[in-house]
Image (cartoon, rainbow, N blue to C red):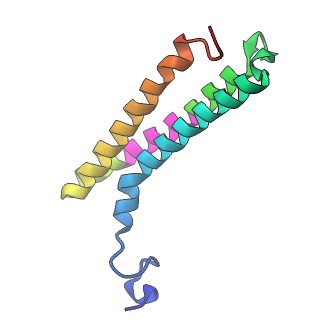
């Protein structure tokens, strides 16, 4: 059966619901990588010395990507919560659980940004 015959455009046997279940973890992983890579580059090149309104620009960058990530995960969590009440089945619950776990993981990764020095002692 061709991809067009299945109607989902992904080919045989692919469940788009699986992507929605994994997407929160992909978003968390992207945030995690981007956060640590940004700090590494900023510290290696001395960019932590640049300030905007007295705040290091690397901190502003980290807070901005964290806010965007949290916003995206809140939207996914809200959508998953609506779908749990509308759908029955394990996949809807898995999507909600994945969204909540990824949201907690991002919130936990904010702790070093908020309380630890980003570059050195």
73 sits left or right of 85 in the view: right
Q: Nearer the viewer, residue 45 or 26?
A: 45
Give the mark count.
Answer: 0
Residue 92 location (% of width, % of height)? 26, 54
Residue 77 location (% of width, % of height)? 38, 42
Question: Is residue 63 depicted above or below 32 in this figure?
Answer: above
Quarter-wise, where is residue 53 in the image?
top right
Question: Is residue 85 depicted above or below 61 in this figure?
Answer: below
Asked whether residue 57 is in view, the answer is: yes
Q: Nearer the viewer, residue 49 or 85?
A: 49
Task: Name the outermost residue toward the left.
Answer: 89
Question: Is residue 9 depicted above or below 68 in this figure?
Answer: below
Question: Is residue 79 depicted above or below 74 in this figure?
Answer: below
Q: Which residues are magenta?
A: 67-79
Residue at 42%, 77% in the rendered image: 8
- The main secondary structure of the magenta stretch is helix
Q: Quadrant of the C terminus?
A: top right
Residue 30 location (% of width, % of height)? 54, 43
Residue at 19%, 56% in the rendered image: 90
Task: Name the outermost residue toward the bottom.
Answer: 1
85 sits left or right of 48 in the view: left
| Residue 39 shown in magenta | no
Asked whether residue 84 is in view, the answer is: no
Residue 65 location (% of width, % of height)? 61, 34
Q: Quadrant of the N terminus?
A: bottom left
Residue at 31%, 50% in the rendered image: 95
93 sits left or right of 6 in the view: left
| Residue 72 shown in magenta | yes
117 sits left or right of 49 in the view: left
Q: Nearer the viewer, residue 3 or 121?
A: 121
Residue at 78%, 26% in the rendered image: 45
Quarter-wise, where is residue 12 in the image?
bottom left
């Amino acid at each position: 059966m061709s991809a067009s015959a299945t109607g989902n455009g992904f080919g045989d046997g692919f469940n788009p619901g699986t992507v929605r279940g994994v997407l929160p973890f992909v978003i968390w992983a992207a945030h995690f990588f981007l956060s640590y890579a940004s700090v590494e580059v900023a510290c290696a090149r001395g960019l932590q010395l640049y300030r905007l309104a007295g705040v290091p620009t690397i901190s502003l960058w980290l807070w901005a990507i964290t806010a965007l990530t949290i916003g995206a995960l809140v939207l996914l969590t809200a959508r998953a919560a609506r779908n749990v009440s509308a759908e029955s089945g394990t996949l809807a619950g898995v999507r909600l659980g994945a969204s909540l776990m990824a949201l907690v993981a991002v919130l936990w990764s904010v702790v070093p940004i908020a309380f630890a020095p980003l570059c050195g002692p």
